[in-house]
Image: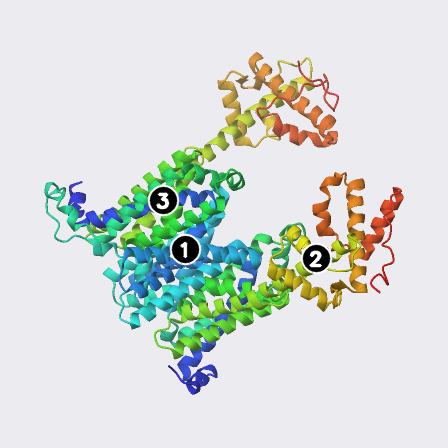
Amino acid sequence: MTTLAYAFDFGLDLFPLLAGTLAAITCGLLGNFLVLRRLSLMGDAISHSVLPGLVIAFLIVSTRSPIAMLLGAAGAGVLTVVLVELIKKYGRVEAGAAMGVVFSVLFALGVLLIEQAAVRHVDLDADCVLHGQLETLVWFDAPATLAELFRVETLAHVPRQVWTLAGMCAAAFVFVGLFYKELRLAAFDPALSTTLGFHAGFMHYLLMVFVAAATVAAFEAVGSILVIAMLICPGATARLLTDRLGAQIAWSVALAALAGIGGYLGATAIPELFERDAVNAAGSITVAAGVLLTLAIIAAPRYGLITKALRRRRMARTITRDDLLATLYRIEEAAPGSRAEPVAIRELTARFPARPLRAAARDAARRAFVHADAHGLTLTEAGRQAASELVRRHRLWEHYLVEHVGLHPDHAHPTAEQLEHLPPQPPPGPTTDPHGREIPR
Amino acid sequence: MPDLAELLDVLTFRAGFNTSLVVAGTALLGLAAGVVGVFALLRQRALMADALSHATLPGIAIAFLAAGALGAQGRTLPVLLIGGAISGVLGVVCVQAMLRHTRLREDAAIGIVLSVFFGVGIVALSYIQAHAPAGSAGLTRFIYGQAATMQPSDVRLMGTIAAIAILCTLLLLKEFALVCFNDAFAKVDGWPISFIDLAMMALVVLVTVAGLQAVGLILVVALLIIPPVAARFWTDRLWALVLLAGGLGALSGYLGSVLSALLPRQPAGAVIVLTAGAIFAVSMIFAPARGVLASSIRRLRLRLRIAGEHLLEAAHDENAVELTPDRIGRVARLRGWSSPFRILVLASLRRQGLTRTAPSGLVLTAPGVDRGAQVSRKHALWAQYLISYADVAPSHVDWSVDQVEHVLSPALVAELESKLASRGITVPPPPSTHGANA
C-alpha cells in the first residue's frame, strides 16, 4: 500500500484523474440509451465525425473557445445523423454501411483539415484526437500534503479542460434527469412515445447532440477512443448486471467511475511499481472498461457465463436423475410381478452415458428415491411416486401432442421427453396414452 | 499549386519510380478492397470490418515488442502485419463470441471490440514510445497511413497481398454469392457455410492488413465499404457489382494517391477516402435507376400524372369539358396542391395534349375527355370491388381508390369487370365522349 501511495502522487495526478473520470462518467451515462436503442455505433460514428466540425470551428474563431468547439461538434453530430438517415432512406443502403460511409468520409475530411491547419501553424494534432492529452494536465506545482491540496485556492489551478468536463457532466445529468421519462419511453417504444406527444425522433436528435457535445468536451483531454469506449462499455456491462433501467444507469455510472479511476491508476502507478514510465492514460481507462466488461461477461449474477454454465449443469443433472427414475419405473411396469428385482447399472448403460448415470444414481440414492446395493438399483416408494408423476406427465403430453397438436404418434415421444421436465402441467387427458399404455394415477 | 504537366506526369506514371509505384500499389489495393468489400456489404458485415481494422493496432505493437525482444532484425513490415492480422482476427472472434454467449447486440459488441482493442494498442504504443524509442516512430503511421513514405518493397508487399485477395475472391465468387444471397439454401445444399464465411473474413483481413500502411487502420474500412455501396447504385447484377466496385475502388486509390503526391501535406489515406466519398455522392445522386435524381424525377412524373388525372376525372364527373379556374381551384384545394405544383400539373396536361387553350379558356381535348372517363370508370370499378369483395364500407373506399385508380392495368380492369359481373354488378362503360367538345 505504501508503495502504491508513493507511486501515485495525489496532487500531481488530481486533475488528469478528475478529467478522465468525468469524461468516463459523462459518456457512460449517455451511452445507456445508445446501447438500449442499438445505436452504439452511432456513438462511434459521431465521435469520428465531429472532427471536421471541431477543426472548422477552430479555423473560424482561431482559439479553442469551448462555445465555438461545442457548436461545431454539435453541428457535425447532427449532420452525421441527418446524412446517415438520408442515405438510408433515399439510397436504400443498409444502416451499418450508411454509417460507415458517413463517418469515414467526415473523419477523412477532418484529418485533411487538420493538415491544412498545420500549414497555417495552428496547433492541432491528429494523434491527440485519438488518445487525448491527459498527461498535459498534470499539476507539477501541486502542494505536497493533502491538507494543503483541499483548499479554495486549489480551484484557481483547475485547468480549463476539467471545468469543461465538469460542466458537461453536470449538463448530461440534468438532461437525463429532466428527460428520464421521455428517454425511457423513446428507448423502449418509440411509436408509443410519438403518439403520446414526446416526439421520439426529436429525442433521438437531442441525445445525439448531447453525445456530440460530450465527445467534444472529452476530446481535448481524453481523445475520441475513450469516448467511444465509454459510450458503449459501461452501458453494455450494466446491461449484463440488471434488467431495470434505473439500476442500469446507476451501475453504468459507477462502472465508468471505477474504470476512470482504476484505468488512470493502472496507467501511472502500476508501471511505476516496475520502475517504468507511465503509459497512455486514456488507453488504459479504455482497457479498464474492457476488463470490467469481461468480468461481467464471466461472473454476472444472472447473465454471466459461470451462472449460465451452473444453471445448465444443474438442469442437466435433474433431468438425468428424473430420466433414470422414469426408466426404472418403466422397467418395473414392463415386468409386473418382478417388482423387487434390482436393475443392474450395467443394464442401463445402453440408455445413459456412463458418468452422468453414476452421478444420477448416487444423487437419487441420497434423496432416498432408489435403494442401491450390490445387485443394482431398486425404486423406493418415494422414488416410485416421483417416477410415476414424471411418466404421467410424459404420457399426458404425448396424448396432447397427438390429439391436439396433430403429431403422428411415433413423433410425439421426443417432444414429450423435453416437455415432461418443464414446469407447465399437461392438460388432463384419458387414462391411456397414444401407444395404449396406462397413464399412472 | 502543381501545374497541368506535373499532374499529367503523375497520372501517367512518369513522375519517378517511387511515386508511380505508390500510385499503382494503392490503385491495386482499391481494386482488391472494392471486390472483397462487395461481399462484406452483401453479408451485412460492413462494420465488422471496422472492428477488425481497429483491432489490428495491438497486434502491430505487440509484434514490434516481441520482435524487439527476440532481436531487432525481426521488426520488418511482414512481421508487424502478421501481428496485426492475428489481433484483428482475435477481435472478430471476440465479437462473434459475445454475440453467441452474451445478451449484447451486434452494434455493442462491435463497438466494444473496436474501442477496447484500440485502447490496448494505444497503451502498448505509448509504452513503446517511452521504452523502445528506436524505430517506434514508424508505428504511428499505421493509424493514419503514410503512402508517401512507403518503400518499394512495402509497396510490392501491399500489391502482392491485394493481388492474392482479388484472385481468391474470383475463385470463390460462386460460393460467396450463394452464401450472401441464400445461406439457408446453401446450408441445406451441403455447403460448408462457416468455412466460406471464414474465407470471406480472411480476405477482409488480407485487404485490411494490406491497406494499413497506405491508408491507415481508421480509414481502411472506408475502402471496403464505400466503393461497393457506390457501385450498388448502378447495377443489380452481382458480376457487374464486383467489377464496378473493384473499378471504383481502383479509381479512388489511383486518383487519391495522385492528388496526395502532388499537393503538399495531403495525407494519402484521407484523400483516397474523400475521393471515394465523392464517387459515392455522384453515384447516389446521378445513377440512372437507383439514383436519387432519377427516382425523384420518376416520383414527380407519377405525381403529375395522378394529379392531372384527378383534374380530368373531376371534369368528367361534372360532365364538363372546360377547366375553369374555379374548377381547378376546387380540385387543388381538395388535393392540397401548392400553386407551383398546380402550374406544373396544367403544363403537363397541355404537353400530353389532354387539354388545349380555347377562346373561352382551358378545355379538354378528345383524348383528355377520354382519359377522364376511363379514370372515373376505374374509380367506380375498384370502389365496387372493395365494397362487394373486401367488405369495405362504402364511406371508407374513397381514399384507397383515389390511389389505385391510376395504376389499374387493362388486364386487371377486365378481371374486375368479370368478377363483378359474376356477382351481377355491372359498372356501365363510359358513354362515348367523342364529339363532346366538337
Residue contact between numbered discs 1 and 2, judged by CB atoms under 8 Å: no
> Which tag is nearer the camera, tag 1 or tag 2?
2
Element marked by disc 3 = helix
How far across and how far down the image is residue B168, in percent? 56, 66
| Residue in view at x 51 percent, y 55 percent | A85
- Tag on residue A77? 1
Q: Where is residue A67 in the image (x, y as percent from the top left)?
A: 30, 55
Alpha-carbon span between mark 3 and mark 2: 52 Å
**Residue A153 vs residue B104: left or right?**
left
Residue depicted at x 12% and y 52%: A141
Split into 4 quadrants, where in the image is the C terminus of chain B?
bottom right
Q: Are marks 3 and 2 on the same chain?
A: no
Colour mode? Answer: rainbow
CA–CA distance between discs 1 and 2?
Answer: 39 Å
Q: Compared to A429, does A9 lie above or below?
A: below
* Neighbourhood count class around disc 3 (C-alpha, 10 Å): few under 14, some 14–19, many 20 upward: many
According to the picture, the residue beneath numbered tag 3 turns out to be A28
Query: In terms of depth relative to the viewer, which is nearer, A389 or B369?
Result: B369
Label 3 with label 2: CB-CB less than 8 Å: no
Residue A423 rendering spot, x and y as whole percentages: 57, 24
Q: Which of A99 and A198 is in front in this view?
A: A198
Residue wearing tag 2: B306
The kind of residue on which mark 2 rests is Ile
Alpha carbon separation for disc pair 1 and 3? 18 Å
Residue A111: image quadrant is bottom left
Q: Mark 2 lies on which chain?
A: B
Determine crowd level at label 1: few under 14, some 14-19, many 20+ residues with C-alpha closer than 10 A: many
- Other residues around mark 2 within 10 Å, as few (<14) / some (14–19) / many (≥20): some
The chain to which mark 3 is attached is A
Dot label at residue A144: none
